[in-house]
Image (spheres, rainbow, N blue to C red):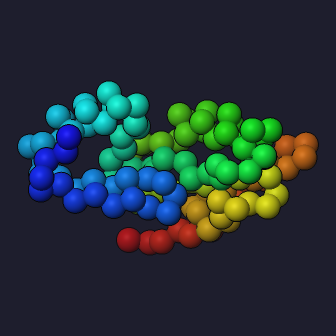
Amino acid sequence: MLHADAEIEFTTFKQLYIDIEEDHFDETKEKLVEAGLEVYSTGFFSKNLIACNFCRGVEEAGLTVAIKLNEIVAGHTVPSPLKVGYAGCANATSEPLFKDIGIIKMKNGFNIYVGGEGKSS
């Protein structure tokens, strides 16, 4: 269970943002990881991958690649927050073109887009 003073937000991309006191961080992170969740820091880090997760394309071309990409890109220190989006087909319902880096699985390869929503600090 999280501490009573924790503030939790559930995003449209099925992510939880949890705001807690720093002295509760290690204990809370441990509990979340034990529950099978991945925990990433906020701020100047590459964010976990945003991907589609509801159509047939997920099974055919999306989720396996998205999981591998997330392992590679998430959690690295960067000069500015970095968002990477992935779509398993050309419908691109996860809106990868609006991310700093967008990757779209096409029939015989991938299209990669850079600079979709970059912001200077």
Q: Residue at x 27, y 53 (%)?
A: 18
Q: Is residue 112 above or below residue 119?
A: above
- Residue with the most extreme top position: 34
Residue 91 in the image: state x and y as whole percent.
79, 61
Of 39 and 47, which appears nearest the observer? 39
Q: Quadrant of the C terminus?
A: bottom left
Which residue is outermost to the left? Answer: 23
Residue 42: image x %, image y %?
Answer: 33, 53
Classify residue 101 as left or right of residue 105.
left
Q: Position of residue 47 (x, y in %)?
A: 46, 51
In the drawing, does residue 95 fall left or right of residue 3?
right
Q: How many marks?
A: 0
Picture residue at 8% right of the left edge, 43% below the top: 23
Position of residue 101 relative to residue 1, above or below, is: below
Q: In the rendered image, which quarter contains the N terminus?
A: top left
Q: Quadrant of residue 97?
A: bottom right
**In front of the other: 101 or 35:** 35
Whether residue 42 can be seen here: yes
Q: Residue furthest right?
A: 108
Q: Nearer the viewer, residue 97 or 90?
A: 90
Q: Can I make out residue 44 in this image?
A: no
Residue 36 found in image quarter: top left
Q: Position of residue 26 (x, y in %)?
A: 18, 35
- Pick the residue in front: 24 or 9: 9
Residue at position x 32%, y 47% from top? 41
